[in-house]
Image (cartoon, rainbow, N blue to C red):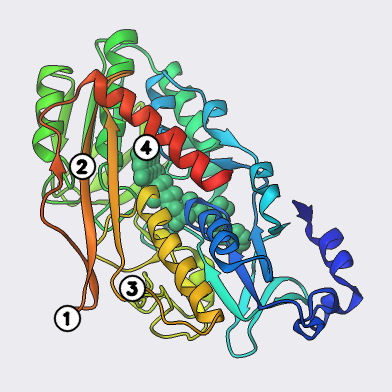
Amino acid sequence: MMQRREFLKILGAGAIASAVPGFAHAAGKSQGRVVIVGAGYAGATAAKYLRLWGGDQLDIILVEKSTIFVSCPLSNLVLGGSKRIGDLTFNYSGLDRYNIKRLYAEVVGIDAAKRKVHVGEGDFLEYDRLIVAPGIDFMYESLPMLESAAAQESVPHAWKAGPQTINLRKQLEAMPDGGVFVLSIPKAPYRCPPGPYERVSQVAFYLRNAKPKSKIIVLDANPEIVSKKGLFTKVWAELYTGMVDYRPNSQVVEVDVGARSLKTEFETVRADVLNVIPPQRAGKVAQLAGAANVDKRWCEVDFLTYESKVVPGIHIIGDSVSAALPKSAHMATSQAKVCASAIAASLAGDPPDPQPVFANTCYSFVSDKLAMHVAHVYRYDLAKKIMLPAEGGGVSDKPTELEGDYAQWWAKNIWSDVLS
Ligand SMILES: Cc1cc2nc3c(=O)[nH]c(=O)nc-3n(C[C@H](O)[C@H](O)[C@H](O)COP(=O)(O)OP(=O)(O)OC[C@H]3O[C@@H](n4cnc5c(N)ncnc54)[C@H](O)[C@@H]3O)c2cc1C
């Protein structure tokens, strides 16, 4: 992947202020240009499958602000101590074979009327189709005291894997035996419904072995555990007896960063290690594109194409989408494939698949080896025009080591699918 200046130079001098000559459609070869913003689970998958299904003549540009891909799935295991962040960190060289132009840059604006993506002052890329896949951003207006980098150093979210995950692990390592870890969970919808409860289990796994006198307080803004409730409740009671104090309907309203304490409507809770996962919405660039039309948070799309319902020509995939679907990596890749297929069809003058079907599985590790899953197949409902769970699916009976193996292989498979 190239840095922005170098890339735009190669595209041609005109790229700074006008259309890109080196890739102009007038060359007669290209069937169209698709620009993809964000090379996470959704965006990288869309780029690869557009090449596979859209053919060689498609001009595909992938814009990503980070030079590395760090997986959120399995990142809770870094907190538990059975994985290192390096095990979850990859570069993008596996995509080289697909002839996808990659650009490291932050997208700072989208002009949907002119079909331009702004990647810096005066620099832009033109597109025929745009895919916006920026994941989530945090709603710090509800917790302004956590907005600064310094505050997030003291009170990490660790909800975007990377330095924040390492920071939280270090804080847990430094915590005295007998200390209190407090996790604050926002109201759903948020990224990865079972993720916070997997985190509780991973932290409990670490503390049970390393600092058994310690306690975990879970302040959940939701009225109950959002995913795999029966399973997590049983795991905490049986594997981590007496360690986890779960408090529902406990929305954080204020954080004292210096004192590492927080207030809910009912109480003030002090922590030795404080982990606040803030409320979330579609990534900022989706907001800038004007596509976040649901509660000013999420993006409404047509589930046959993932084209925005409010901004024509822009497709949204992954966590930013508004849907009664889990915000998961598996779901992000499934949406990316439907979207890639629809765009490839549309550029060839064909209609999209009239009734897409895809699956989602979310594994949760509750120790270094034991895991459990929730899985469903989703089918497009012709009358309601949304994706609905088909018959079947469901959750594990109990966590097992066999499912732990499946979960490790699930991760290897999805990384391979997304990045190579
Ligand atoms: C702790 C944790 C555990 C999880 N476990 C699982 C699991 O076991 N299974 C599962 O399926 N899911 C899991 N998830 C959820 C999963 O990580 C997300 O659902 C998934 O990452 C969503 O993919 P995405 O492509 O929408 O967003 P992301 O993967 O976050 O990708 C978005 C990309 O866009 C880039 N970007 C954003 N804005 C810009 C911009 N302006 N310019 C350029 N680039 C930009 C970002 O740098 C990023 O690379 C977990 C999440 C967490 C936090």
In which quadrant is the C terminus drawn?
A: top right
- In the rendered image of this protein, does residue 332 appear above or below residue 184? below
Q: Disc 1 designates what residue?
A: 383
Alpha carbons under labels 2 and 4: distance apart = 25 Å
Alpha carbons under labels 4 and 3: distance apart = 35 Å
Q: Disc 4 designates what residue?
A: 275
Amino acid type, callout 1: Ala
Q: Disc 2 designates what residue?
A: 374
In this view, the mark in front (1 or 4): 1
Ligand 1 within 8 Å of the CB at mark 2: no
Residue 325, located in which quarter of the rendered image? Answer: bottom left
> Pointer 1 and pointer 4: residues touching (CB < 8 Å)?
no
Q: Earlier in the sequence, mark 1 or mark 2?
A: 2
Alpha carbons under labels 2 and 3: distance apart = 22 Å
Please give left or right for residue 262 compared with residue 221 in the image: right
Ligand 1 within 8 Å of the CB at mark 4: no
